[in-house]
Amino acid sequence: MSMRDVKVCLLGDSGVGKSSLVMRFVMDQFKPALESTIGASFMTKNLVHGDKTFKFQIWDTAGQEKYRALAPMYYRGAAAAIVVYDVTKESSFHTVKDWVKELHRHGPPRIVLAIAGNKCDLEDLREVSRKDAKDYAEEIGAVFTETSALTAANVPELFSQLATKLPSDVEPANQYRPRSTINIHQQSPERRRRGCCGGGGNSAANSTPESQAFR
Ligand code: GTP
Ligand code: MG
């Protein structure tokens, strides 16, 4: 079975639930009082899909405006980006469009996009219609789904849909390569190839919460 490294980053307004989605996907947990992310955080999770195993290397960015300028460090070299909004917050959907424009201008040329409307459990508070969001996603050729980190609805599906859209011949430039963002020490080429956190040879555990960067 082949193993593919997939660097993916999550973008979107503060409070839309990016970290909660990652926690649901990686650990199948939901913590109601999660702290707002500082800088970014990194986790990995393997997903078996068909005859392939995808090793998702997930950069969960901070949505607060003051961290805005850091985003290029996380989407650079990413094979995929998940742009998240909160279905109960119209303004967060506008921010999605800003991120898509930025990714089109400055992101990796063949980046696969997904739009996730999170908190779909809060139907009574909905401000963004599913149809509007779906139409927009279709227009830009992005994967679309409405998710709930709380109930787990569509969370694994989001990542597997993304996996199916990845081109099979990922260019080396689109593969995960830690750069100046986190590797303070020079790494040997072998180690660099496997990723910064020594992913190779690790046991059966297929989900590894890893360090918080930029503390
Ligand atoms: P930043 O780190 O500041 O960018 O925010 P974030 O996008 O990572 O949001 P976070 O995951 O911290 O969630 C913000 C708040 O929304 C928390 O109180 C979560 O418990 C809540 N939340 C996240 N996902 C859901 C969901 O699917 N449903 C509901 N009802 N609440 C959610
Ligand atoms: Mg967060």
Image (cartoon, grey):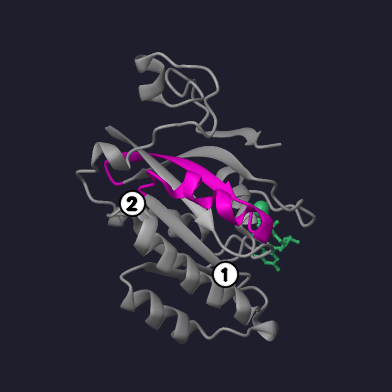
Residue nearest the viewer, comparing 32 with 94: 94
Quick check: 167 above or below 208?
A: below
Precedes in sequence: disc 1 or disc 2: 1
The residue positioned 55% from the left and 22% from the top of the image is 184
Asked whether, in this view, residue 14 is left or right of residue 10, the answer is right
Quick check: 75 above or below 54?
A: below
Which labelled disc corresponds to residue 68?
Answer: none
Q: What is the C-alpha distance between the residues marked 1 and 2? A: 22 Å
- Assign the N terminus to one quadrant of the image: top left
Residue nearest the viewer, comparing 142 with 180: 180
The kind of residue on which mark 2 rests is: Pro
Residue 154 visible in the shown view:
no
Reading the image, the residue beneath label 1 is 85
User: Could you tell me residue 15's position as x and y percent?
Assistant: 69, 63
The residue positioned 24% from the left and 43% from the top of the image is 170
Reading the image, the residue beneath label 2 is 108
Residue 204 visible in the shown view:
yes
Asked whether, in this view, residue 30 is left or right of residue 53, the answer is right
User: Could you tell me residue 75's position as x and y percent?
Assistant: 44, 49
Dot 1 falls on a residue whose secondary structure is: strand
Quick check: 10 above or below 128?
A: above
Q: Give the range drawn in magenta.
A: 50-79
User: Could you tell me residue 76's position as x and y percent?
Assistant: 41, 46
Is 62 a magenta residue? yes
Dot 2 falls on a residue whose secondary structure is: loop
The kind of residue on which mark 1 rests is: Tyr
